[in-house]
Image (cartoon, rainbow, N blue to C red):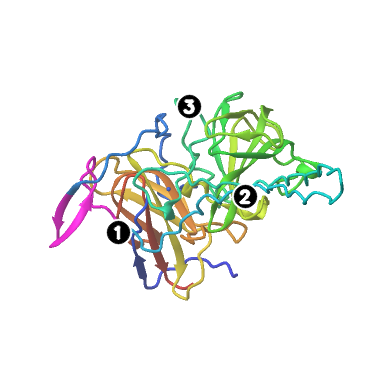
Amino acid sequence: MKRYILAPVSLIILIFFSGCASTPASSAEDVAAAPPPTATVIPTAELPSISVYELIEGEPVEVLDNSGLPAPVISKNEGDAPEGAPSLPTAVPTVPPPTPTDTPVPPSPTPAETPTPVPTFTKPALPNTSDEAHYWMIRPIPEGGIVWTDKSYSYGSTKGNTLRTHHGVEFFVTYDTPVLAVADGTVIVAGWDSGENVVGPEPDFYGNVVVIEHDFLWRDEKIYTLYAHLNKINVTKGQRVSTGDQVAISGATGIADGAHLHFEVRQGANTYADTRSPLLWLWPFPEDGTLAGKVTFENGELAYGAPVSYRRLDGGDRRVYSATSYADEAVNGDTVWQENYAADDVDAGFYEVYVKIGNKKYGDEVWVYPRRTTFIDIVIPNP
């Protein structure tokens, strides 16, 4: 696919919302960087039920109790994770009839067959979100720590063309911070990133690394999470883990230039080429939502590395924040969303979302809802 240089012409804007609720990367020119948010408790309690209705522009629109914002339309094309598979029946031993002799000999029963274990896939549930959002993972850092993702080197970005395209997200924690399993599963890799454990683009890339295969499927494909640059690993290959179990402590092994946790979501296969944006999987904070969408040219081609800015219009923090569209084809959009940019930890509210070329903006105004994903397509002029 060709790489284009952005230049102003005309615009087509496609916007739509999806009923669900999940990060920005390097800043564009004249865009102020956001300060790190304060530590926030990982959501564990159920959200309040939706029970208030208001009449907006002549149409009844559902709103959230705690925000008063109109709720987005829930897509009718939601994908359900598979329900639990039925257990195999236990084989019943068969006994042959007695041998017709004067002294019947008790027959030896046929040994009972051992049924093959059938995995039970349990779909995690974050209250009041649809399946399409698949917010099925807690943050991998304990409450009270640095539980937000780094915005300067987000999924699919290059940190201003200074680093390779990022296949995950970073949590900038200090050495020996507990690292938690984000969902139930089985450890399939626990050791140094080399030999049969190579899970990075080359040996020794991730240093000490843990990979978990989770107990649910997404669109009939397995989901894996990867935890890298660890100082010490606390689990072994084949071990079962539950959501919130400590699997390691953070470090700076491999090619890391300082202590942090590198976290990935992989779909379909445990390979470096099969990553997806963690921003669309990790639970949003209770008052936050996620922005996602596509930046394309009028001819339908994806725009790589396009600066996407967003600014709140209804009060609150009025500063401009930024993300970038994915730098190249090395990373993947979500199976449902098919996005090429995303931003997490976005305060719920009314936003202007745009790509600025010269002195002209291409974008629109959208609502961001708590624990939902707001999707917006931005179409910019052909080069």
Q: Is residue 180 above or below residue 176?
A: below
Residue kind at label 3, given as amino acid type: Gly
Image-quadrant location for residue 316: top left
Q: Which mark is residue 89?
A: 2
- The reply to whether callout 3 and callout 1 are in contact (CB within 8 Å) is no
- What residue did someone put label 3 on? 145
Q: Residue at x 35, y 62 (%)?
A: 363
SS for dot 3: loop
Closer to the observer: label 2 or label 3? 2
From which residue to which does the magenta span run?
A: 53-73
From the viewer's perspective, tell me whether residue 273 is left or right of residue 104.
left
23 up-or-down from 246: above or below: below
Amino acid type for the residue under numbered disc 1: Val
Q: Label 1 belongs to which residue?
A: 73
Q: CA distance from mark 3 to mark 1?
A: 34 Å
Q: Residue at x 30, y 52 (%)?
A: 351
Q: Residues within 10 Å of mark 1 (few under 14, many from 20)?
A: few
